[in-house]
């Protein structure tokens, strides 16, 4: 079995979870790293055995290394597209951290580069590897819910703002909507079978952070801490998508799906619902009959997603998380942003096509 040699772009916070995961996967090794901060490169040398000569301030230099077959992109969200596109065009496969990007144009450039080069682009949506989402997808695909005509999906925190690169427009691009909202939105689109969004109405706001009483640093927040979208799909299904980093309430509601035959609630990680559980609301012979699924095993989702990526690279499989489906999260983010800029009025949205 050949060893898949990887390069890392962006050796900050979350990259360390991937370093730990890759170190546990047989036949995979991070051999090079790029970051703008020298201390982060030193950490790659000292903690993860990367040779000093394989550390770079400029990722384009790292991408010249022929032995690198695949690249992990862990830069801030608004800086995902340039390294991802450069890596794909340099002949590398890419695992890029969530969300795909901040703007639809940037996300489209990534999906287009993957399409044109034929290289793998996987977006790291760790919740897809939880037993809860896997089970929920099985339930939906078995037809238990029938046609899903309405859903609400929520990722919320009462006092959970991140700081640093996450609250700056230049690095993050978007705030809560993309940061934690991507988990709720991706879970919903995945379970609904990726219908195409055609219209979005939404709002984005950051008044609570700007006027907050608990952390002066958050008064400099440049992106939204709260976002709500109403999405219409081409199959006539509707979705309400709500997310916040901070709020003066305990919850924005739960994540649920209404089907013609049954309904389903799910809660896992950032996705609000019956925490770590699934409940199916149905009936049998005219009597209400519900089923609850709990006691899911605990899974190391970083090891699971990185293993899936390495397996796809080694065996020439398609991306384990289809970039085209991921692009739809950006279609919705962009719709919420554009609608908000337009006073909350409905905007038409389009899923880009290639080829
Ligand atoms: N999957 C998860 O659980 C999870 C958790 C946290 C963050 N994330 C995602 O990971 C990404 C990074 O988040 P983070 O918390 O690690 O942020 P971070 O700010 O700690 O790290 C980002 C790193 O990228 C580097 N960087 C920026 N521009 C660069 C460039 N042009 N070339 C090379 N390096 C560059 C920065 O110097 C920094 O070290 C974000 O998109 C975020 O949404 C995912």
Image (cartoon, rainbow, N blue to C red):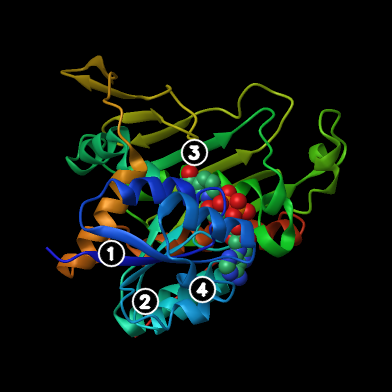
> In which quarter of the view is residue 288 placed?
top left
Residue 69's disc number:
none
Q: Are marks 4 and 3 in contact (CB under 8 Å)?
A: no
Quadrant (top left/top right/bottom left/bottom right) for the N terminus? bottom left
Q: Residue at x 78, y 54 (%)?
A: 222
**N-terminal-most mark, 2 or 3:** 2
Image x and y of residue 257, in percent: 39, 36
Residue that label 4 marks? 83
- For the residues carrying marks 2 and 4, which lies nearer the camera in this image? 4
Q: Tell me the distance, in whole angstroms, between the alpha carbons under discs 2 and 4.
A: 13 Å
Residue that label 3 marks? 153
Q: Tell me the distance, in whole angstroms, between the alpha carbons under discs 2 and 3.
A: 29 Å
Residue that label 1 marks? 319
Q: Are marks 1 and 3 in contact (CB under 8 Å)?
A: no
Image x and y of residue 255, in percent: 46, 33
Q: Residues within 10 Å of mark 3 (few under 14, many from 20)?
A: many
The number of discs equals: 4
Q: Are marks 2 and 4 in contact (CB under 8 Å)?
A: no
Q: Nearer the viewer, residue 34 or 121?
A: 34
- For the residues carrying marks 2 and 3, which lies nearer the camera in this image? 2
**N-terminal-most mark, 4 or 3:** 4
Image x and y of residue 176, in percent: 63, 46
Q: Residues within 10 Å of mark 2 (few under 14, many from 20)?
A: many
> On the picture, is 211 further left or further right than 243?
right
Q: Is disc 3 placed on a helix, strand or loop?
A: strand
Q: Are marks 1 and 2 in contact (CB under 8 Å)?
A: yes
Residue 114's disc number:
2
**N-terminal-most mark, 4 or 1:** 4
């Amino acid at each position: 079995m050949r060893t898949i040699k990887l390069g890392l772009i962006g050796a900050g916070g979350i990259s360390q979870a991937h370093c730990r995961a890759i170190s546990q996967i047989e036949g995979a090794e991070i051999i090079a790293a790029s970051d703008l901060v020298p201390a982060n490169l030193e950490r790659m040398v000292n903690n993860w055995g990367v040779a000093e000569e394989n550390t770079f301030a400029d990722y384009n230099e790292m991408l010249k290394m022929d032995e690198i077959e695949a690249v992990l992109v862990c830069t801030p969200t608004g800086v995902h597209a340039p390294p991802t596109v450069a890596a794909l065009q340099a002949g590398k496969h890419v695992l890029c951290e969530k969300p795909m990007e901040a703007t639809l144009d940037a996300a489209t450039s990534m999906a287009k580069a993957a399409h044109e080069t034929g290289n793998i682009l996987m977006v790291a949506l760790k919740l897809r590897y939880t037993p809860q989402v896997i089970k929920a997808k099985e339930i939906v695909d078995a037809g238990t819910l029938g046609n899903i005509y309405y859903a609400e999906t929520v990722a919320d925190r009462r006092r959970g703002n991140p700081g640093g690169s996450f609250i700056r427009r230049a690095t993050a691009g978007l705030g809560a909507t993309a940061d934690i909202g991507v988990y709720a939105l991706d879970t919903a689109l995945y379970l609904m079978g990726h219908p195409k969004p055609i219209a979005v109405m939404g709002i984005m706001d950051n008044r609570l952070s700007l006027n907050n009483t608990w952390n002066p640093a958050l008064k400099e927040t440049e992106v939204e801490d709260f976002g709500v979208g109403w999405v219409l799909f081409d199959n006539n299904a509707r979705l309400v998508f709500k997310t916040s980093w901070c709020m003066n309430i305990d919850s924005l509601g739960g994540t649920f799906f209404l089907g013609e035959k049954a309904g389903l609630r799910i809660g896992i990680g950032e996705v609000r619902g019956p925490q770590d559980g699934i409940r199916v609301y149905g009936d049998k012979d005219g009597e209400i009959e519900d089923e609850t699924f709990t006691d899911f095993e605990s899974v190391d989702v970083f090891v699971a997603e990185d293993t899936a990526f390495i397996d796809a690279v080694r065996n020439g499989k398609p991306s384990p998380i289809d970039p085209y489906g991921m692009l739809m999260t950006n279609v919705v983010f962009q719709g919420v942003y554009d609608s908000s800029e337009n006073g909350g009025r409905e905007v038409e949205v389009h899923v880009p096509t290639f080829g």
